[in-house]
Each structure stands twice: as structure tokens, then as C-alpha cells.
């Protein structure tokens, strides 16, 4: 029994799995939704895929003790870049995609270098780059195209890879999300890099003294999150054949909520990729699944707030149990 | 041994003598924001021309500054105490709708709506404070949670009670005069309320002993508690103060615009944080000043509105604000290091 507790109950993702089950049960029992309809619905899976690709690197940054809110500007930035380069200027779609991802690398580098070189908290640094990028994207798009919405006609292969609708309703980005989750899981939980990230979030000075290249790792994580955000924007532009300047801001808080519900500690050093994955699903089910119930959809934000606070409190007590559990085991052996 | 600096005073508490030298002036928390404010002011005089200097030009940014400023003051105090409050983005529309639903939709006297909307702000602040104090969860997460919660409640109750997401309200002449009129046709009366708030917060932070407690709280919470400061009560009070101020702005908005909508206030979250940070407050707590917050708010409002007086594209405004924010934090970083280094040299 104690082995069972140690192996399954005290893992970072348990809180998110419990909240997910509770939410589905709540929607089915109180809201009168049918399970098969709810679980097979494209709306929340598409929503989760878009959010999840951003939430993964944001969660990793949080485990490393950093924050990135500039993603809110990088999603429209990625989508506008593809549309302007490949749509407005008529370049090949590959050039547009590379430009979008390159912009992500650039902004990520800027965030990372500023976070490493100064003692300013990354929340403030990325707030600055968020606002500046918003201005650049809006101003640039108005300056170049004269409007705030641009259309793009992607090549068939790009549409097939990044923008097709499978079965008429499932976005292909879902597979990218699953693939990225697997890649992130491998790197975080099966390679030394993962340990480095946890060590950095636990105690940065000790991590550096232990020989971990903390600066390079921090910059890499910021680049990763900016690139993932512009990737989501790029896929949206390819899927919908047009780009809009607005629409990224909601991702900031949504990603943080998904990550925290997934059991990641805001102060760093604790969390898991699977937790972030399930946290994203929980958030998406609350946000979109409510349409399948009799509950008035206006209350969905209230449920999200309650789930977040409950999940945080639950994760807190689980974490305390987890931390007090391991020393006891050591004492016994 | 010589480099050890025991008992470094937090630079924010150091009182400036009236005969402050340039050196000590530069080392105060508001130095960076003063330079920033003057720089943007001159910039927009040059590029905005005479209309920017006319009363209409002043009113355009003062009106914006007053709205953000009333919220930014308590946010700044919370940040000095080492906490964050995101929930203001939901409290503003919640208070606005409370006012409009009670005094507009149900036709109750204005004072009932005003008291109820301010009570909503105090209540949310109280909940924030109690959760933060009792659980130890970072206030960023707690207030994101209450933000979503209050947003849901506002939307839900608004649709439930009135059947729509916006409600009209015509305030009585007294409330209109005190909270919603435009002096000389262009200056919102909120500017005078902002001045009152500034005076109150200045007294609280820089004159009364509570101010020292707030700095101590942000510097080192455990030591502050050991020194006998009622940290829990103070934290809750600060959250209630920010809830109250946000509700005040929301309530005034309902009276000024004669209607209240569910979807307003989100922009206040990041805008107020930016004002406070440009004003030289340290996100990690323990450093800052009321004058700095006010100057930061003015800088933000001038850039935000002044851009419309120039021939530049309005979106350039956010590029300037973002750059300014990054410059401000770098500059404050340097100034703070200078401030701490002088105090140790004095020793």
C-alpha cells in the first residue's frame, strides 16, 4: 500500500488527474452531459492542443523558476509573420514559416539574455517584450499591409502538415501537441537536461556551482517558449488562411492556469510534463465542455477559478506529503 | 570583513532632507521614473506640438492617469510588500456592474450601489488576503484564481439578474457631481480623487509607521513577523485596499459612462503593473515610493495618450511603453545598486 502511495499518489500530476475526473463527473452528473459526447468532442481537444503546445514550455520555464508572458504577443506575431511574408508578399510558404519561427528565436533570445544578464524578474522582462511586440506586430502590419488582418494561401503540403482538419473537425495540430508532449517528456524525465531544469528551479546558485550551464539553459528555455508560441500562431494562420493581430492575450493566463493545475510549483523545482498535459486537458474541458451541459456557459470562468484554487491547495498538500514521505522511507531502510 | 554590510537600510525608507544633494536625489527610488517622465514629456512636446500642451492635451492623459493611478497605488504597495494582485482586472467590471444593477436596473438610491460596489471590492480583497496568508500559495496564482472566479460570478449574475451583459445607469445629480462630472468640460473629477488617494497613500507609506512595516514585509517576511509586525493582518489589509481602489474606479466608470459592461478592466492588470515598475518599485518587494508610482503612472499615461497628438502610428505607443519598461527596470537596477553601495560606504 505504501508503495502504491509512493509511486502513484504522490506524483506531481495526481492533482490534475483528480481534478480532471472530478470535472468530468461534475459535468456528467450535475450538467447532464453524455460521457461519449463530451470525451469525443473536437472543440475541447482542438482548444487543448493549441493551449498545450504553449503550456509545455511555459511549464518548463516555471519549473526552472522563470515566467514568460510574452507568449501572448508571440502567437499573433507568428501568425502575422506567415501571413505577411507568404500571403502579402507572395513568398513560398516555407520562407514565411521560417520567418515566423525565426522571430520566435529572436524574441526568446532577447528575453533569455535579459533574464540572465540582469537581476530583473522575468515576469517584468517578458511584460516589456509582450507590450513592445504587440506594438511591433500591430504597427508593422498596419504599416506594411494597411490593415489588421491578412490572408494567406498556403501550399498543399503545408496545409496538410499544419492546417488540415481531420474528419472535418479535428485540427492536425493535435498530433503536433501529442508529439511535442512526448519529446518534452523524454527530455525532461529521461535525459540530464530535465534534472538540470529541476535543479535550477530548486536552487539556481547551487545548480551553477554544480556545473550546470544555467545561463545557456535559461536562454534555451525562453527560446523554446517563444518558438512554440509562434508555432501555434503559424499553424492558426495556415489552418484558417488568415491572420489576426488580436487573440493571443487570453493564452497568458490560460497557460499559467493549465500549468499550475498540472501541479507545477510557481516558485520552481517541482512539476512534470504529464501534469502539464493533464492540466491543459482539465482547463480545456472546463472551458469548452461546459457547452455540452445544461449549465449556463457564463459560469465557466467561475469553475476555472475554483478548480485552480482547489488544485493548488490539493497540490500543496500532496507535495507536503511527497516531501515528508521520502525521508521516512530512508529512515526505515 | 570590510565589504560586509550589516543592517543595510532599505533605500526606500531613507527620508530625503530638504537640502538633498544631486547625488542623494539620484539614488532615491523615483529618480529613474522622474527622468523617464521628463523625457517622454519633452519628446511629446517636440513631436506633438502645441495641442499636446493645451488644456485638452493635458486632460487627455490626466484622465487616463487618474483611472490607472488609483489602481496602481495599492498595487505598488502590495508589490513593495512582495505580493501581486491580478484580480483587479475582474473587480473593476464587478464593481461597475454592481453599481449599475443596484442603482440602475433596480432603481435603488445611488448610495446603496456605491456602498455595495465598494463592499464587493473589499470582500474580494479580503478573500485574496486570507487565502494568501493561510495557504502560502504565491499571490500571483491566488489572484489569477479569484480573477477567473469573480469574472464568472459577474457574468453569471449579470445575465441571471438582468438578462444581458451590460446595464445602463443614470446616476443622481449628487453622485454625478462628486464622481462623474468633467470639470471645465474636460478634466474628469476622478483626477481630484486620484490626488486624494496619492495624499492618503503617501501618508500611509512614508509618514505613518505602517509604511515601515510594509517595507519590512517586502524585505524579509519572517524577520518582519519576528520583529512583532502583524504581517498577516497587514497583508490582508493591503489586498483589501487594492480591491477597494479597483472597485472605486469601476464604480466611477459606471457613473461616467452611464453604463457598465462585463468585459472591461483586463487592460488594467498589466497597465498598473507597468506603471508601478516604471515608477521604480521592485517586483520582489522592499523597495519603492509613492512619488515614484505617481511618476510612473504619469509617464505611462503620457505615452499612451500623447502618441495620438503626434503623426506617428498609434501602435508605436506600445513599442515605446515596452522599451521604456525595460529601460526603467535596467536603470532602476543600476540606481538601486548605487543606493545600496552608498549606504554601506556611509557606514
Image: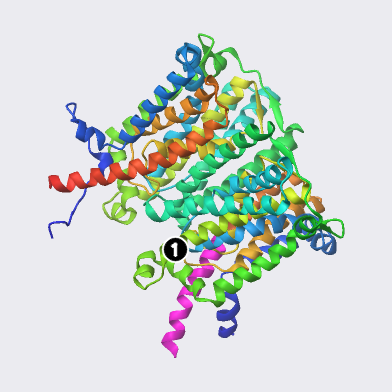
- Identify the residue shown where x is 55% and y is 65%: A315
Count of labels shown? 1
- The image's colouring method is rainbow
Q: In this view, which residue lies farthest toward the bottom?
A: A333
Residue nearest the viewer, comparing A167 with A297: A167
- Based on the picture, tell me whether residue A173 belongs to the magenta stretch: no
Residue drawn at 49 percent across, 22 percent down: B61
**Closer-to-camera residue (A88/B211):** A88
x then y, percent, for residue A214: 42, 65
Residue A250 visible? The answer is yes
User: Left or right: A209 with respect to B141?
Assistant: left
Q: Is residue A313 magenta?
A: yes
Query: Residue A30's x, y, as percent?
Result: 77, 56
State which quarter of the image contains the C terminus of chain A. Answer: bottom left
Mark yes or no: residue A258 visible. no
Which chain is home to disc 1?
A
Residue A139: image location, x then y, percent: 60, 34
User: For the residue labelled by badge 1, is the local secondary structure a helix, a strand or a loop?
Assistant: helix
Q: Quadrant of the N terminus of chain A?
A: bottom right
Q: Which residues are magenta?
A: A311-333
Using the image as rendered, state which of residue A192 and residue A123 is in the foreground: A192
Which residue is labeled 1 in the image?
A216
- Image location (x, y in percent) of residue B177: 53, 13
Number of residues whose C-alpha sits closer than 10 Å to that of mark 1, classed few (under 14), some (14–19) or many (20 or more):
few
Amino acid at each position: 500500500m505504501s508503495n502504491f502511495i509512493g509511486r502513484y499518489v504522490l506524483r506531481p500530476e495526481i492533482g490534475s488527474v483528480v481534478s480532471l475526473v472530478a470535472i468530468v463527473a461534475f459535468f456528467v452528473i450535475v450538467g447532464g452531459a453524455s460521457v461519449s459526447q463530451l470525451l469525443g468532442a473536437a472543440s475541447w481537444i482542438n482548444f487543448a492542443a493549441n493551449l498545450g503546445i504553449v503550456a509545455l514550455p511555459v511549464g518548463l520555464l516555471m519549473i526552472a523558476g522563470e515566467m514568460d508572458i510574452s507568449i501572448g504577443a508571440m502567437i499573433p506575431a507568428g501568425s502575422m509573420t506567415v501571413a505577411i511574408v507568404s500571403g502579402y508578399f507572395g513568398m513560398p510558404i516555407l520562407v514565411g514559416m521560417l520567418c515566423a519561427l525565426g522571430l520566435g528565436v529572436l524574441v526568446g533570445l532577447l528575453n533569455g539574455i535579459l533574464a540572465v544578464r540582469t537581476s530583473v524578474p522575468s515576469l517584468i522582462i517578458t511584460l516589456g517584450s509582450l507590450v513592445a511586440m504587440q506594438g511591433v506586430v500591430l504597427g508593422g502590419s498596419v504599416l506594411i499591409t494597411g490593415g489588421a488582418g491578412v490572408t494567406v494561401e498556403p501550399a498543399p503540403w503545408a496545409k496538410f502538415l499544419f492546417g488540415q482538419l481531420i474528419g472535418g473537425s479535428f485540427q492536425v495540430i493535435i498530433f503536433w501537441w501529442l508529439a511535442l508532449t512526448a519529446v518534452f517528456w523524454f527530455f525532461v524525465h529521461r535525459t540530464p537536461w530535465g534534472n538540470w531544469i529541476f535543479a535550477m528551479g530548486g536552487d539556481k546558485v547551487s545548480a551553477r556551482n554544480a556545473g550546470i550551464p544555467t545561463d545557456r539553459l535559461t536562454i534555451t528555455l525562453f527560446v523554446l517558449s517563444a518558438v512554440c508560441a509562434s508555432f501555434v500562431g503559424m499553424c492558426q494562420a495556415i489552418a484558417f488562411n488568415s491572420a489576426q493581430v488580436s487573440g493571443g492575450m487570453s493564452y497568458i493566463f490560460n497557460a499559467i492556469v493549465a500549468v499550475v493545475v498540472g501541479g507545477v510549483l510557481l516558485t520552481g523545482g517541482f512539476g512534470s510534463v504529464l501534469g502539464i498535459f493533464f492540466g491543459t486537458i482539465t482547463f480545456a474541458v472546463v472551458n469548452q465542455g461546459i457547452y455540452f451541459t445544461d449549465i449556463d456557459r457564463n459560469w465557466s470562468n467561475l469553475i476555472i477559478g475554483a478548480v485552480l484554487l482547489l488544485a493548488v491547495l490539493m497540490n500543496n498538500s500532496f507535495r507536503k506529503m511527497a516531501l515528508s514521505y521520502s525521508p521516512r522511507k530512508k529512515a526505515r531502510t | 570583513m570590510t565589504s560586509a554590510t550589516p543592517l543595510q537600510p532599505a533605500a526606500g525608507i531613507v527620508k530625503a532632507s530638504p537640502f538633498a544633494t544631486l547625488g542623494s536625489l539620484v539614488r532615491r527610488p523615483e529618480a529613474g521614473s522622474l527622468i523617464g517622465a521628463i523625457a517622454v514629456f519633452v519628446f511629446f512636446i517636440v513631436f506633438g506640438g502645441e495641442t499636446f500642451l493645451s488644456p485638452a492635451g493635458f486632460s487627455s492623459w490626466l484622465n487616463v492617469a487618474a483611472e490607472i493611478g488609483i489602481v496602481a497605488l495599492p498595487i505598488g504597495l502590495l508589490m513593495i510588500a512582495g505580493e501581486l494582485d491580478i484580480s483587479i482586472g475582474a473587480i473593476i467590471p464587478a464593481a461597475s456592474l454592481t453599481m449599475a444593477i443596484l442603482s440602475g436596473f433596480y432603481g435603488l438610491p445611488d448610495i446603496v450601489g456605491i456602498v455595495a460596489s465598494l463592499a464587493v471590492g473589499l470582500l474580494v480583497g479580503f478573500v485574496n488576503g486570507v487565502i494568501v496568508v493561510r495557504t502560502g500559495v504565491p499571490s500571483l496564482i491566488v489572484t489569477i484564481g479569484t480573477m477567473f472566479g469573480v469574472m464568472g460570478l459577474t457574468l453569471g449574475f449579470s445575465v441571471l439578474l438582468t438578462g444581458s451583459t451590460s446595464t445602463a445607469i443614470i446616476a443622481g445629480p449628487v453622485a454625478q457631481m462628486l464622481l462623474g462630472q468633467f470639470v471645465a468640460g474636460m478634466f474628469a473629477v476622478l483626477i481630484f480623487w486620484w490626488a486624494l488617494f496619492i495624499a492618503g497613500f503617501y501618508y500611509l507609506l512614508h509618514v505613518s509607521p505602517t509604511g515601515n512595516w510594509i517595507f519590512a514585509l517586502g524585505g524579509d517576511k519572517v524577520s518582519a513577523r519576528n520583529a512583532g509586525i502583524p504581517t498577516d493582518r497587514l497583508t490582508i489589509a493591503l489586498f483589501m485596499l487594492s480591491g477597494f481602489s479597483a472597485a472605486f474606479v469601476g464604480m466611477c466608470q459606471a457613473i461616467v459612462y452611464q453604463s457598465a459592461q462585463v468585459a472591461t478592466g483586463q487592460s488594467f492588470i498589466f497597465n498598473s503593473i507597468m506603471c508601478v515598475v516604471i515608477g521604480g518599485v521592485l517586483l520582489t518587494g522592499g523597495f519603492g515610493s509613492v512619488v515614484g508610482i505617481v511618476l510612473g503612472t504619469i509617464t505611462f499615461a503620457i505615452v499612451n495618450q500623447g502618441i495620438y497628438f503626434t503623426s506617428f502610428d498609434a501602435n508605436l505607443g506600445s513599442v515605446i511603453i515596452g522599451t521604456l519598461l525595460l529601460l526603467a527596470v535596467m536603470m532602476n537596477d543600476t540606481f538601486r545598486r548605487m543606493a545600496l553601495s552608498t549606504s554601506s560606504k556611509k557606514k
